[in-house]
Amino acid sequence: MSSVTSNSSMRSAYRVTIGLRRGLKSFRYTSKPTVVPVNPFDPREDAAVLRKAMKGFGTDEKAIIQVLTRRSNEQRLRIAFEFKTLYGKDLISDLKSETSGKFEDLLVALMTPLPQFYAKELHDATSGIGTDEDVLIEVMCTMSNHEIQVIKQAYTAMYGNFLEDDLRGDTSGNFKRLMTSLCMGNRAEDFHVDQEKAREDARSLLQAGELRLGTDESVFNAVLCSRSFPQLAAIFQEYQFLTGHDIDDAIKAEFSGDLEKALRAIVKVVRNKPLFFAERLHKSMKGLGTNDRQLIRIMVTRCEVDLGDISDMFQSKYGETLASWIEGDCSGHYKKCLLGLLGLY
């Protein structure tokens, strides 16, 4: 690839990442990120610091961590652009040659434009033998319309396929229909709540589930994939009034498998998105072994959005800090880098 093409691709990734980040921020009323753009920002100076940290014998991992965990994804891409301009070398390639293991994986994730990062996670979840439905649920059930559209563009650019086609080809039944609907990125996103319509939808869900023999999955699909999150919250409240129990209990009784997990994920995200991700982080570190890919994905993608809220929810639910779990479950520079994303290194 020529340098002109490479630089053009980098600029394009930079612009798309800005768009995705704006979409992330605009979808939430308030949030508590742990990584914010540094100001003043000098990408050439940062590039020089990284070059020095990796030049000659030995590597200054502390310098690398302190630069990359204290800059936004957008700023890291600008540093990479300046690094190649100044030294004629690819920053990611240098980082990979100087580091290894999970620390390397985390650094590469930090240096990847967000749309491309999500696209790769979805592609890896559907390629090869078997499907990682948990990844599909985590990404597709939590994204805004804008985020989904940008990820779809990145996916096609990277793999030459449409995300929808790959999702449909690797899933089946009603779960496939749910993923297809979410992939449209066509959910209502206004904040107006129509209480009468919420009552109608609650009755429709009741009639499609608990009040009939068998379940009409299409009604749940239509409501949970197209209504806005504020409207869904009102629908769930009306369902409680109608039945005396929670919509989550009804979904557990009426559905099973991946479809149940996905529908319950939507309910959780509507009610408390930070708590949803706190539970995912807890699951990634609970028991024997660590799901490092899940841990890295959430830490990297949420640090500029609501990782502070997620950390608060983690402590509230589990009585221990997220930082203490990372301390106990990870080690070395990998651990320090994760703590850096929490603003603790």
Image: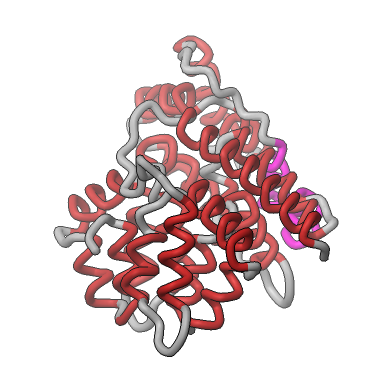
Q: Is residue 55 left or right of residue 14?
A: left
Seen from this angle, which residue lies furthest left? 319
Residue 39, horizontal then vertical, whole percent: 35, 40
Q: Residue at x 68, y 52 (%)?
A: 10
Q: Is residue 200 above or below residue 296?
A: above
Q: Residue at x 38, y 82 (%)?
A: 289
Q: Is residue 142 visible?
A: yes
Q: Is residue 66 above or below residue 115?
A: below
Residue 135, horizontal then vertical, whole percent: 56, 60
Between 174 and 243, the residue placed more toward the observer is 174
Residue 173 falls inside the magenta stretch? yes
Residue 342, horizontal then vertical, whole percent: 28, 56
Q: Is residue 344 left or right of residue 272?
A: left
Task: Name the chief secondary structure element in magenta.
Answer: helix
Between 159 and 47, the residue placed more toward the observer is 47
Q: Is residue 53 above or below residue 212?
A: below
Q: Is residue 184 above or below residue 160?
A: above
Q: Residue at x 48, y 48 (%)?
A: 75
Seen from this angle, which residue lies furthest front? 86
Query: For residue 243, which quarter of the picture?
Result: top left
Q: Is residue 273 left or right of residue 311?
A: right
Q: Is residue 173 visible?
A: no
Residue 87 falls inside the magenta stretch? no
Q: Residue at x 51, y 43 (%)?
A: 142
Image quadrant containing the N terminus? bottom right
- Range of residues picked out in magenta: 164-184
Residue 198, horizontal then vertical, whole percent: 49, 18
Between 57 and 121, the residue placed more toward the observer is 57
